[in-house]
Image (tube, helix red, strand yellow):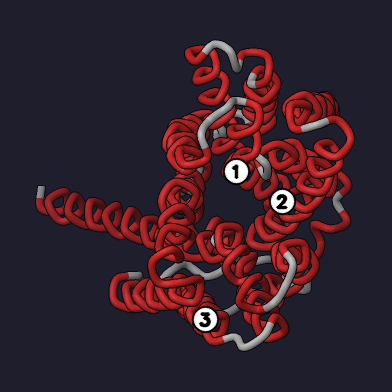
């Protein structure tokens, strides 16, 4: 009796620390992802102030994605042995400095440097936070834990980016970066005060390097699948505001609210991902890609029916949001020998897909018009479904 009375509070306390840690990971992710994507809403203002064209200012987005893609895996492997709590606080402080530098940037070159600083740290955060959350949650609950961390992504799309854009109208684009710098400092302080000591990176056999997973062809196939999945997602999503305004006929003044509604519905997708991904990451990928293809492809044909349009956008939003954590868990499980590096490679793959999807979507608009975006994006999602089924078929003999 005495032992059980001592054990129960200890277990409860451990559960509370795990929940608090995962919550702090999500809050940190919210601040970092808002920093990454808020520039989409600030481009017109900063382009005017710095004497740039919109096209030239838009290259800041490409610069961020390419930096993440190229340097993330190497930095994660290099920093994987550092104490996790210290590493997370350092990353958030780098983002605070990056935002402050962006706020005072006198020209586009300094602004580009500020963006590169954040881009170098971002994939290290997502890779290590995903691995740490999975370690804290324990076997069989890794997908649930990663989905909770990825709530920070959903919250950034629903609240952070729209509110940051609104703030730019009140305090200017520099003011928005100052606000983000302050938010990052606050997150670093919360992590210092409340984040407990975290488990170190999993022990590996002597002489075994994290890069051993790069020799696994099946793991590489999972990474390439993420590139294809994110290409499908961002071929249309990059231009969702344009689709709403030009295809669905939503008044320009209301587009922001529709985007926020899209993100709110996406929260259901995050919950769905946490429920299904631990059972079968590849099966969950197929299911969500099918839903994504249906939602994206149905928007243009049903624009004359408001109820069907809302259903199509809801399907799109749920699948879009759910695919973020599902891809992360899928790649991390495929690279179980080095999950932090695997998670970072998935983030790099995602950014590669974002860049390719945005470019493909731009070409589709130029050649076929905005209304064709949903059809092309659905076709890419169909290719991703076929690739996923091939991976599933390849796994059966091994099982």
Q: In this rendering, which labeled residue sits more in front, label 3 or label 2? A: 3
Relative to the observer, which residue lies in front, 281 or 148? 148
Relative to the observer, which residue lies in front, 241 or 143? 241
- In this picture, residue 62 sits left or right of residue 37: right
Separation of residues labelled 1 and 2 (CA atoms)? 9 Å
- Indicate the position of residue 395 as horizontal and vertical percent values: 80, 30
Relative to the observer, which residue lies in front, 326 or 201? 326
Residue occupying image coordinates x 60% and y 17%: 303
User: Which element is circle 2 on?
Assistant: helix
Identify the image quadrant of residue 52: bottom right
- In this picture, residue 37 sits left or right of residue 76: left
Identify the image quadrant of residue 75: bottom right
The correct choice, above or below, for 229 with respect to 314 in the image is: below
Residue occupying image coordinates x 79% and y 40%: 361
Q: Which residue is mark 2?
A: 350
Q: Residues within 10 Å of mark 3 (few under 14, many from 20)?
A: many
Q: In this rendering, which labeled residue sits more in front, label 1 or label 3? A: 3
User: Which element is circle 1 on?
Assistant: helix
Q: Which residue is mark 3?
A: 103
Residue occupying image coordinates x 62% and y 68%: 124
Q: Which residue is mark 1?
A: 324
């Amino acid at each position: 009796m005495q032992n059980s009375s001592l054990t129960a509070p200890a277990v409860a306390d451990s559960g509370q620390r795990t929940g608090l840690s995962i919550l702090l990971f999500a809050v940190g992710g919210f601040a970092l992802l808002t920093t990454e994507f808020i520039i989409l809403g600030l481009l017109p203002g900063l382009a005017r102030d710095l004497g740039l064209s919109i096209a030239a200012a838009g290259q800041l987005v490409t610069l961020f994605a390419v930096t993440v893609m190229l340097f993330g895996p190497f930095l994660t492997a290099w920093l994987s042995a550092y104490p996790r709590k210290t590493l997370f606080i350092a990353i958030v402080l780098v983002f605070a400095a990056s935002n402050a530098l962006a706020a005072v940037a006198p020209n586009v070159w300094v602004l580009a440097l500020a963006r590169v600083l954040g881009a170098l740290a971002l994939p290290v955060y997502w890779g290590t936070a995903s691995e740490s959350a999975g370690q804290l949650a324990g076997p069989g609950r890794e997908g649930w834990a990663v989905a909770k961390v990825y709530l920070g992504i959903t919250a950034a799309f629903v609240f952070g980016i729209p509110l940051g854009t609104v703030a730019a109208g009140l305090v200017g684009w520099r003011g928005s970066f100052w606000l983000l710098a302050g938010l990052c400092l606050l997150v670093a302080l919360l992590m210092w005060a409340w984040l407990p000591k975290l488990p170190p990176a999993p022990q590996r056999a002597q002489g075994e390097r994290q890069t051993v997973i790069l020799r696994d062809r099946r793991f590489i196939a999972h990474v390439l699948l993420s590139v294809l999945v994110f290409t499908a997602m961002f071929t249309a999503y990059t231009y969702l505001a344009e689709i709403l305004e030009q295809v669905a006929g939503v008044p320009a003044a209301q587009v922001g609210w529709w985007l926020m509604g899209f993100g709110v519905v996406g929260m259901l997708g995050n919950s769905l991902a946490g429920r299904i991904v631990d059972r079968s990451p590849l099966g969950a990928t197929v299911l969500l890609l099918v839903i994504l293809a249906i939602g994206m492809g149905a928007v243009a044909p049903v624009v004359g029916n408001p109820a069907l349009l809302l259903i199509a956008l809801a399907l799109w939003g749920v699948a879009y949001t759910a695919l973020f954590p599902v891809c992360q868990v899928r790649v991390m499980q495929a690279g179980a020998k080095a999950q932090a590096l695997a998670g970072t490679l998935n983030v790099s793959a995602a950014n590669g897909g974002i860049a390719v999807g945005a470019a493909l979507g731009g070409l589709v608009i130029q050649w076929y018009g905005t209304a064709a975006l949903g059809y092309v994006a659905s076709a890419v999602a169909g290719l991703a479904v076929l690739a996923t089924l091939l991976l599933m078929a390849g796994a059966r003999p091994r099982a």
